[in-house]
Amino acid sequence: MINAPFGDCKSAALHLADSIQPFGVLLVIEREGGRICAVSANVEAWLGLSPQGLLGAPWSAALPAGLRALVEALPDEAEGRQAPGSPQARLRAFRCNGRSLIAALHLAGPHLVLELEAGCAPVFGQREQVLAQGVAALAATDSEEAAARALMRQVADVTGYDRVMLYRFLPDWHGKVIDEVLRPGVEGFLGLHFPAGDVPANARRLYLVKRQRVIADVDAEPVPVLSAVDGLSVDLTHAELRAVHPVHVQYLKNMGVAASFSVSVVAAGRLWGLIACHHLEPKAVSFADRQLCEQLATVAAIHMSDLQRLAYEQARHAHHLARARLRLELQASGGGRHAIATQLERMRGAFGAQGGWARLDGRDHYSGDVPDEASLSVLQRWLDRLGGEKVSSYDVLPAALEVNPALLRLASGLLYLPLGGQDFVVLLRVEQPENVAWAGGPAAPPESGAPPLGLGPRTSFRVWREQTRGRASPWLDTDIEAAALLRAMLLEHGERLDLERMALTDPLTGLCNRAMFERKLQEAVDLGVRGNDLSALLMIDLDRFKPVNDRYGHPVGDALLVEVAERLRRHVRGRDVVARLGGDEFAVIQFHAGSERDVEAAAARILDAIRAPYAVLGHRVEIGASIGAALCPRDAAEPQALVKLADLALYRVKHGGRDGFRLFDSSMLA
């Protein structure tokens, strides 16, 4: 046999199974030498060829004619072109021994893995229609959870299982059923939590690379895979038929499940959740339907990753604006260390914290809900052990602090920004108690000194309720990143240390700088020329800006520029690019601009936004803008030429009274 019998479920190498499920047959071929080195024991029932006759035989002579062309094509075509760990299977429908079969072949290190199961080639058009409908449903969603819910419903429609659940992994890897589709009379698990041990780390790793998995019949006896050489190791990560660990099979039996199908929900390369499908009777999902579900999941993964990146960038931008305002406030107030205390409320707002505590030059300052002084002394002694070199955080109160009621209530979440010496800023989040309903009670702790038990199947799924304590709303990655940048800003008092922002964004406004502007403009021009897709460049000069600087000073002028930048961001589409080119000069690049009328409408919105009065550092300010625009590829098909024509249109606005918009036309060249 290949591989070795499974060990403990929690640590077993699940991809190195020694058997397969009996709804198909598996053959393993050496890539070098071309001999069949392993076959499942049921091969004769499927191909009419005995295992003894196949093992060690050249595949070119032993395999039926319908399979030989499939094997011949894969090695040369796939060599070096597949992403590691993600091989694409080649498929073929053929008939053998009077039955219609689907053959799937993929690379697995030094081997080719060939699998056969009953089935016909999908009818042209049906699969494509379902896929198109699924893509449309996913495209209509605007959040990761909504996309995952849409995917769950698509999988339910394709498979027809009795119970289809959307299982979301939470930060500690325990899961919660957040949506489900049920056949009438079938018990549901909506809202219930499942311990992290139900899907251990080795299983999660496999779900991440093998995106769909079927168990057609939990009572079916696995079929051993025989090998020509003892101890042969074959990676079955991507095998459709790979047998699963007996503990998982028993787990399903304990739930009353006779068949299951799972689809991985992945976002940004991380296992977000699972779509777990259960049937109360044995049920096989056809190869075509499994592949369709996997394709839908791939589309969902791309969409969810895009949504995640968008949310991440939006959060980063919000934090940047908050830091920009804070920097201006510090500059306006003189910028000493004592001024940091006046910004505690602004910091709390930026990070969604209910309390703020700062120690600056030996004095304590507070904002919002904070524990009493005695409790803060306990917290400070704990913080002293962290060191003063970097930001630290928690969103679950450490065990050493749980005994303090005030810390439990008001400091279950913490961001710690050491500022050198004895100075620091601490942002606090209050406790968020939660009543958690578990599907089954907690495991009893092992007796003291007893060795840990191996992972076994749970026998009970009765609801058990627990109130969690000492937990706060979790800090996001963007919060931790922003806290480090805030700390750097406070330490340097306005020095800009973020190299990426220095390279590609305007340090005052957070908009693209000239270098990024030029890069994005080249992209817009390339897109317009290659796809004949209209792009637009709007060059913007602020009117009446210099008198603001002269009258109120540069801090007010800078604050005004930040407000202008924020209005520009609010009044363009998400895919458009806003840049500050220097001083009071801005630009907007519109990808997929639509039509001249759409560009004119966008310019009108921008003009109205900029004209609206500003309240800046206690001053009421009114300004205007002159805007000139040019279109690609209609007016120019090269970035510098496009800038020149948009500047020419802007020149006409300025010399026609300012505070308006002109779109370039050829008469301007006369």
Image (cartoon, rainbow, N blue to C red):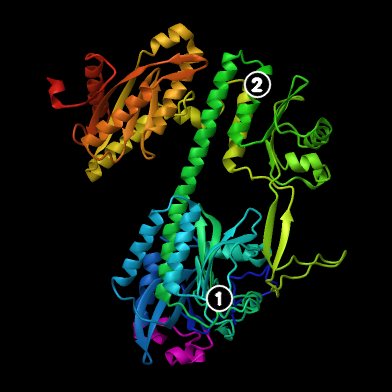
> Which residue is rendered at x = 75% and y = 45% of the image?
397
Residue on which the image places disc 2: 342
> Magenta region: which residues?
40-66
Q: Where does the C terminus fall, quadrant-wise? A: top left
Image position, residue 313 (x, y; %): 48, 39
Pick the residue in front: 89 or 189: 189
Note whether 184 is above or below 579 in the view shown: below
Between circles 2 and 1, the one closer to the viewer is: 1
Instruction: Give the amino acid type for the residue marked by disc 2 in the picture.
Output: Thr
Occupied quadrant, residue 74: bottom left
**Mark found first going from the N terminus, 2 or 1:** 1
- Residue receiving disc 1: 186
- Is 601 magenta? The answer is no
Residue 533 drawn at (x, y percent):
24, 42
Residue at the front extreme?
185
Label 1 Cα neighbours within 10 Å, binned few <14 / some 14-19 / many ≥20: few
Q: In which quarter of the image is residue 76?
A: bottom left
SS at badge 2: loop
CA–CA distance in space, label 2 to label 1:
59 Å
Q: Is mark 1 on a helix, strand or loop?
A: loop
Relative image position of residue 44 (x, y in whole percent): 47, 91
Residue 241 percent across, percent down from the top left: 51, 77
Residue shown at the point (46%, 48%) measured from the top left = 307
